[in-house]
Image: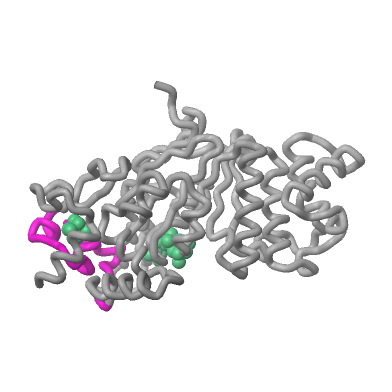
Amino acid sequence: MTAPFFEVENLYVSFAGRQRLFQPTMPSTKAVNGISFTIEPRRTFGLVGESGSGKSTVARAILQLTPISAGRIRLDGVDVTRVQSDDELAFRKRVQAVLQDPFSSLNQVHQVRTIVGDGITRHFGIKPGPEREQRILGLLDEVGLTGEFLDRYPYEMSGGQRQRVSIARSLAVEPDLIIADEATSALDVSIQSQVINVLRRVQADTGVGILFIGHDLEVVRHMSDDVGVMYLGFLVEAGAAEGVYESPSHPYTEMLIASAPVPDPEAQEERRRLRRTFRRDTEPPSPSDLPPGCPFESRCPVSMDICSREMPTATVARHGGYVRCHLHTSGPILAGESVVDFIRSATTRK
Ligand SMILES: Nc1ncnc2c1ncn2[C@@H]1O[C@H](COP(=O)(O)OP(=O)(O)OP(=O)(O)O)[C@@H](O)[C@H]1O
Ligand code: SF4
Ligand SMILES: [Mg+2]
């Protein structure tokens, strides 16, 4: 069997607790707790979850911006978990980031020509001149911008245009993988879909793999082939996007879906009813003090005794991916029912 193109295996990231004068050291924050996934060329893996669930920490760990506590990251079968400084340039060429706020990630004192062209010079040795100019124009065209933008500064562009420049800058080094962390979250809805279409076209043209991180479930669904759902640093469910969205297997995934608005009033009412069954007023546990059992237990409407005692193991879900929930392992609890039907009937019985 060939190795996956990109693989995150059993990744853990903890942040050391703060040292305070004359007070005990704060406990460490367990931001990412043993998550694994793979991305193949031309595929997008979407990561969703509430704020603080650890999505950006995963991105930063892959980009080597945050030290990892345990686990492995491999690119083309090669271990890139801790890239040595000699290999850093090669790694930065292969893995690029597109972040939420292009205004702060683009150098304000440079024109688009330099912002996009720098990587071409650094990684391919092509000095400023006609050849580099042609490449920059080609990249701008790829992201839907004209040569008119060559002389613009970031502050002379809209948010959507800046994000296109940010994508062109990433593409300039011909990466194998793009980490897009909330890349469209700060944009208006119509601009969001334009930028997503740019990313999809770029992927079709270049074959780049994408890790797409977002809050908005529909945006992530639209963009992704596969998705992973994160809660308190755990990947509680993962699989093909259609399967996870159409047939969620984890109560938390169901809660996220029920929280997203839909235009149909009847469907919206049904979601509202389902949403009420979750204990949304309950604070999730602190990532500095994780419970021994299921991290979602305090909010789950169908928790059982075992849930507060034992962490569920990963099992195969109905959609063919995997889920971490005792409903799927502790006896025939679901009896063939989907999780959403089970929650409905269990909460009606109560
Ligand atoms: N540098 C840091 N030092 C200490 N704790 C951190 C640090 N960065 C993140 N955390 C903590 O790690 C957890 C995960 O944060 P992270 O930013 O990865 O979440 P997220 O899913 O990206 O959230 P959001 O959707 O708001 O961007 C949070 O509890 C956060 O407070
Ligand atoms: S393991 Fe238990 S508490 Fe956790 S999501 Fe499943 S049923 Fe709910
Ligand atoms: Mg984040």
Give the quadrant of the N terminus. Answer: top left
Q: Is residue 180 left or right of residue 258?
A: right
- Residue 323 on image: x %, y %: 27, 48
The foreground one among 265 and 339 is: 265
Q: Is residue 103 left or right of residue 145?
A: left
Residue 75 seen from this side: yes
The foreground one among 13 and 94 is: 94
* Count of numbered circles in the view: 0
- Residue 69 on image: x %, y %: 37, 47
The foreground one among 285 and 48 is: 48
User: Which contiguous range is marked in magenta?
Assistant: 281-310
Give the quadrant of the C terminus. Answer: bottom left
Classify the position of ligand 1 by quadrant: top left, top right, bottom left or bottom right. bottom left
- Residue 192 on image: x %, y %: 61, 63
Q: Which image quadrant is residue 26 in?
A: bottom left
Residue at 30% in and 52% down: 236
Q: Is residue 79 left or right of residue 139?
A: left
Residue at 37% in and 54% down: 245
Residue at 36% in and 42% down: 36
Residue at 75% in and 53% down: 144
